[in-house]
Image (cartoon, grey):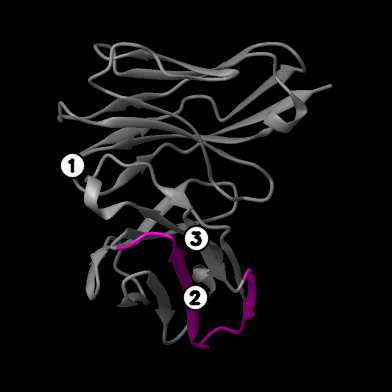
């Protein structure tokens, strides 16, 4: 069966520090991968998605970036964090071979607090 | 552009009763999928139910069922025999031809004992 992991689970970082959040999927190959951000009490905002290694689509211009160095690994990064980057970050995957209609399955998320 | 609207920011239900959460959407595509996700206090998003737009029959998963009205672009979720564990934020989502899901802003469901 497929599983999705995210780490760290919780992170407290000072303003201006770098960020690296990691997401990995097991039990499948060539998944579509997604990064979302959720502010407290609000809906999900899609940040990036990837349909293959090295293929990244950005949804929102900001100081975050994403990379996909391996088939089942998706990394969210920042060179300098802002206070507004605080939130809950969710990674999700869908089977890449079945098209766009597939259900998205979510990881446990990372709580990021920028102070 | 696709939009999803959840007009009920908060709902409450008594344990063992039935509650219906509303969702309306807009899309220009003819082939799409609709989803309800649950986000409990742990904040992990959990799929509750999904509906293929080309299917006329409403999807059902145990105590969860949907009322899919394609012409009205309405997709409501009915929870029967509500349990304390059903308390969560519920999100309606629409999937189209662009690899992405469009989410509503969510409905916070409280279950009263």
Q: Nearer the viewer, mark 3 or mark 1?
A: 3
The residue at the far right in this view is B113
Q: Secondary structure at mark 2?
A: strand
Question: Callout 3: few (<14), some (14-19), or many (20+) C-alpha neighbours within 10 Å?
Answer: some
Q: Is residue B25 magenta?
A: no
Residue A115 visible within the image: no
> Mark 1 near mark 2, Cβ–Cβ under 8 Å?
no
Q: Nearer the viewer, mark 2 or mark 3?
A: 3
Question: Callout 2: few (<14), some (14-19), or many (20+) C-alpha neighbours within 10 Å?
Answer: many
Mark number displayed over residue A4: 3
> Mark 3 near mark 1, Cβ–Cβ under 8 Å?
no
Residue sitting nearer the eye, A82 or B95: B95
Q: Secondary structure at mark 3?
A: strand
Percent coordinates x, y for residue A68 in the rendering: 32, 75
**Residue picked out by circle 2:** A21
- Which quadrant is the N terminus of chain B positioned in? top left
User: Relative to residue B40, is residue A5 depicted above or below?
Assistant: below
> Mark 2 near mark 3, Cβ–Cβ under 8 Å?
no
Please state the extent of the stretch shown in magenta in the rendering: A9-29
Sequence order check: which comes first, mark 2 or mark 3?
Answer: 3
C-alpha distance separating marks 3 and 1 = 24 Å
Same chain, labels 3 and 1 = no
Q: Secondary structure at mark 1?
A: loop
The subunit carrying tag 1 is: B
Residue at image position (38%, 71%) is A74
Percent coordinates x, y for residue B18 in the rendering: 65, 11
Mark number displayed over residue B97: 1
Residue B19 visible within the image: yes
Residue at image position (45%, 64%) is A26
Residue sitting nearer the eye, A70 or B40: A70
Percent coordinates x, y for residue A77 in the rendering: 42, 79
């Amino acid at each position: 069966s497929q599983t999705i992991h995210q780490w760290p689970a919780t992170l407290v970082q000072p303003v201006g520090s770098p960020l690296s959040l990691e997401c990995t999927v097991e039990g499948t190959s060539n998944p579509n991968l997604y990064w979302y951000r959720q502010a407290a009490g609000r809906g999900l905002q899609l940040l990036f998605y990837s349909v293959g290694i090295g293929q990244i689509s950005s949804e929102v211009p900001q100081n975050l970036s994403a990379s996909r160095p391996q088939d089942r690994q998706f990394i969210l990064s920042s060179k300098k964090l802002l206070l507004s980057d605080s939130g809950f970050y969710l990674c999700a995957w869908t089977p890449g071979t079945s098209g766009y209609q597939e259900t998205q399955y979510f990881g446990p998320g990372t709580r990021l607090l920028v102070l | 552009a696709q939009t999803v609207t959840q007009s009920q920011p908060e709902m409450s239900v008594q344990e063992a009763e039935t509650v219906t959460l509303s969702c309306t959407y807009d899309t220009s595509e003819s082939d799409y999928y609709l989803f309800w996700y649950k986000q409990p206090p742990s904040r992990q998003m959990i799929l509750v139910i999904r509906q293929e737009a080309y299917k006329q029959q409403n999807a059902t998963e145990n105590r969860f069922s949907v009322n899919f009205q394609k012409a009205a672009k309405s997709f409501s979720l009915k929870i029967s025999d509500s349990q304390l564990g059903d308390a969560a934020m519920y999100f309606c989502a629409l999937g189209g031809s662009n690899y992405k899901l469009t989410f509503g802003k969510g409905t916070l469901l409280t279950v009263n004992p």
